[in-house]
Image (cartoon, rainbow, N blue to C red):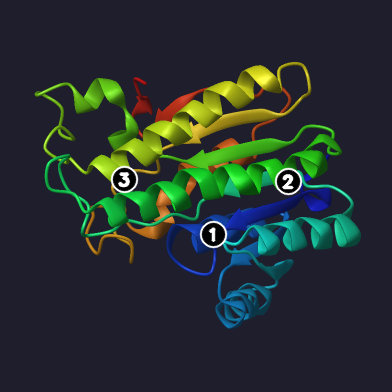
Amino acid sequence: MSNDNRVALVTGANKGIGFEIARRLGQAGVCVIIGARNEQLGHAAVDQLTAQGLNAQSVRLDLNDVKSIEQAAARIDSEHGRLDILVNNAGIFDFADATPSKASLEAVRRTMETNFIGTLAVTQAMLALLRKAPAARIVNLSSSLGSLTLNGDPSSTYYSQQFIGYNASKAALNMLTIQLREELRGTGIAVNSVSPGFVKTDLTGYGTMTPEEGARLPVQYALLGEDAVSGKFVEPDGETPW
């Protein structure tokens, strides 16, 4: 199937990495659906993309609102009949998060509910549509902070970044990738965890990469061809240890 016939949903795509992922997919000829909690911000993102000649639309989708997720899936089914690409990009970072002894329990709870359970809810709702596509792709936006190996390696550049809620949410997201790979084996659906790199966005306010640079790898895995790998955890420098 050519990119011109493919349909992609990118969650949290009204800004940051998500918006750049959507823009690059649109430039590749994919019909992009912007998933956004705020309908006005979603429409504004679509306006930017359509002004560039790209095929884009938006849908209200809040990872903490199951009804909005179900409605988004129903709308995509009604208008497109399938989904070729799901990019689980939406997520949060809470500055009340910290080491296990100091982290706010509410911050940890919010982070896990959004980054893991919310993403699981979206994936479950979209799976029937993904199964209707000839060769669907799921990209879970993870982080090297979700690597148990790197969290336990004092020589790792990520070792000092100890945020029990955020790191655990991304480790859980990686578990989703692994288990989905097994559950979807033989279906033609490939699923991978992709760490875009240390990107400066509204999530943290600091980083060494631009959203444009951070979008490169997720888009690469969203557009994998017939020989697509599945069940991988990758970052710009190569594979990341689980």
- Is disc 2 surrounded by few (<14), some (14 to 19) or many (20+) residues within 10 Å? many
Instruction: Please state which of the two labelled residues, at mark 1 or mark 3, is closer to the viewer.
Output: 1
Which amino acid type corresponds to the residue marked 3 in the rendered image?
Answer: Tyr
Q: Nearer the viewer, residue 210 or 194?
A: 194
Q: Nearer the viewer, residue 233 or 100?
A: 100
The picture quadrant where one finds residue 183 is: top right
Q: Position of residue 112 (x, y in %)?
A: 40, 46
User: Does residue 230 appear in this view?
Assistant: no
Which label sits in the foreground, 2 or 1? 1
Q: Is residue 64 above or below residue 223?
A: below
Question: What residue does disc 2 label?
Answer: 126
Q: At x 88% / y 62%, what residue is drawn?
A: 79
Q: Are marks 1 and 3 in contact (CB under 8 Å)?
A: no
N-term-proximal mark, 1 vs 3: 1
In space, the residues marked 1 and 3 are separated at their CA atoms by 16 Å
Quarter residue 242 falls in:
top left
Q: Residue 219: x, y in percent?
A: 56, 45
Q: Residue at x 81, y 44 (%)?
A: 129
Looking at the picture, how far across and down is residue 215, in whole percent? 47, 51
Report crowding for label 3: few under 14, some 14 to 19, many 20 or more residues within 10 A (C-alpha): many
Q: Which residue is mark 3?
A: 166
Q: Residue at x 65, y 24 (%)?
A: 228
- Front residue of 82/30: it is 82
Screen quadrant of the N terminus = top right
> How many circles with numbers are drawn on the protein?
3
Disc 3 to disc 2, C-alpha distance: 24 Å
Whole-percent x and y of residue 20? 50, 60
Residue receiving disc 1: 64
109 relative position to 173: left or right: left
